């Protein structure tokens, strides 16, 4: 009786478990992405898309100043939100990782997860009450003779919305990374005469580099692709790229041009993500 090849059996076993995720990726990522790329070459005639293979949509969008203005504005906002979020999150994450017990840290992470139980749109609208000219912040500033200040429909309002979306997640990722730092290395740095700030910068940050970078990448990706904050808190002027996509679909049903904007966003995000992954893991891979 012929025996089955164990290598073939092993390959079949692995493929059996990998097939669901492969099918999932093709149905919900590769397939829609390919359709969007193909759509970017279609033409719109009489408010209907016509199959074609022409570069008119790409030339139209890339040749317009408003597209590049929107691109740079979106990129700049996402970068600013990432820097601000990382700097604000680090002290909180540091305290949760090194200054409290493991039980308190677990409860803190649980409380940070709770905001995600609520719709992001609801959390964004709650800032109307806080940031309005007659809102809570201006009322408090009025007691000391300041204000009122315009905070809605501004860049500041957009950044507040971005931080509402990303700050809890970044704190969680940073906390998990910092909590895994080897305490003996920190004690060794202190024994060698390193001060607190030098220990943080030369020992803790490099050891937690992967988590810090991943948190920053998530913040950038979520901010770069967010529609809610710049639309409802930023006033949509100037428009970010997600708002520009909506504008194109409403303007003569220009779905192909919207696809060009979406593909440009995805290429940008993939570039940022792969560059960040390389920065996080490259040195570790060489050692």
Image: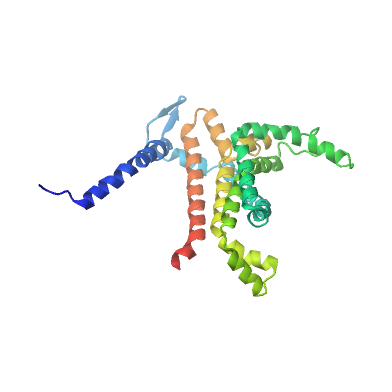
- Residue 7 is left or right of residue 44, and the answer is left
Q: Which residue is drawn at 59% across and 41% down?
A: 66
Q: Residue 270: horizontal and vertical position, in percent? A: 48, 49
Q: Which residue lies furthest to the left in this view?
A: 1
Q: Which residue is drawn at 67% across and 68% down?
A: 198
- Residue 151 is left or right of residue 66, and the answer is right
Instruction: Residue 20: name its quadrant.
Output: top left
Q: Residue 76: horizontal and vertical position, in percent? A: 62, 49
From this view, report whether residue 287 is shown above or below residue 43.
below
Camera-side residue of 155 and 196: 196
Q: How is the image coloured?
A: rainbow
Q: How many labels does the image show?
A: 0
State the quadrant of the C terminus.
bottom left
Instruction: Residue 202: name its quadrant.
Output: bottom right
Q: Residue 232: horizontal and vertical position, in percent? A: 66, 33
**Res. 53 in view:** no
From this view, report whether residue 165 is shown above or below residue 205.
above
From this view, report whether residue 6 is shown above or below residue 123.
below
Q: Residue at x 65, y 41 (%)?
A: 164
- Residue 23 is left or right of residue 132, and the answer is left
Camera-side residue of 131 and 281: 281
From this view, report whether residue 54 is shown above or below residue 50.
below
Camera-side residue of 116 and 152: 116
Q: Residue 42: horizontal and vertical position, in percent? A: 41, 34
Instruction: Residue 155: name its quadrant.
Output: top right
Camera-side residue of 238 and 22: 22
**Res. 48 in view:** yes
Q: Which residue is drawn at 47% across and 62% down?
A: 282
């Amino acid at each position: 009786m012929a025996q089955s090849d164990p290598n073939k059996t092993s390959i079949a076993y692995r493929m059996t478990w990998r097939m669901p995720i492969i099918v999932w990726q093709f149905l919900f990522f590769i397939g829609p992405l390919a359709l969007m790329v193909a759509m970017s070459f279609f033409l719109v005639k009489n408010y209907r898309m016509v199959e074609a293979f022409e570069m008119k949509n790409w030339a139209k969008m890339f040749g317009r100043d408003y597209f590049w203005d929107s691109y740079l504005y979106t990129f700049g906002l996402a970068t600013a939100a990432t820097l601000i979020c990382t700097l604000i999150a680090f002290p909180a994450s540091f305290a949760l990782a090194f200054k409290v017990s493991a039980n308190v840290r677990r409860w803190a992470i649980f409380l940070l997860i709770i905001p995600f139980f609520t719709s992001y749109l609801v959390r964004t609208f709650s800032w109307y009450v806080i940031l309005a000219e007659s809102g809570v912040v201006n009322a408090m500033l009025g007691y000391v003779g300041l204000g009122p200040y315009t905070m809605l429909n501004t860049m500041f309002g957009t950044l507040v919305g971005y931080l509402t979306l990303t700050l809890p997640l970044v704190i969680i990722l940073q906390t998990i990374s910092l909590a895994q730092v080897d305490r003996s290395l920190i004690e060794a740095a202190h024994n060698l005469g390193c001060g607190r700030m030098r220990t943080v910068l030369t020992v803790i940050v490099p050891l937690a580099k992967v988590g810090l970078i991943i948190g920053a990448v998530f913040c950038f990706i979520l901010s770069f692709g967010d529609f809610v904050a710049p639309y409802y808190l930023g006033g949509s002027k100037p428009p970010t790229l997600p708002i520009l996509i909506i504008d194109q679909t409403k303007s003569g049903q220009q779905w192909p041009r919207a696809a060009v904007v979406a593909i440009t966003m995805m290429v940008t995000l993939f570039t940022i993500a792969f560059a960040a992954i390389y920065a996080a893991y490259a040195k570790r891979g060489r050692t």
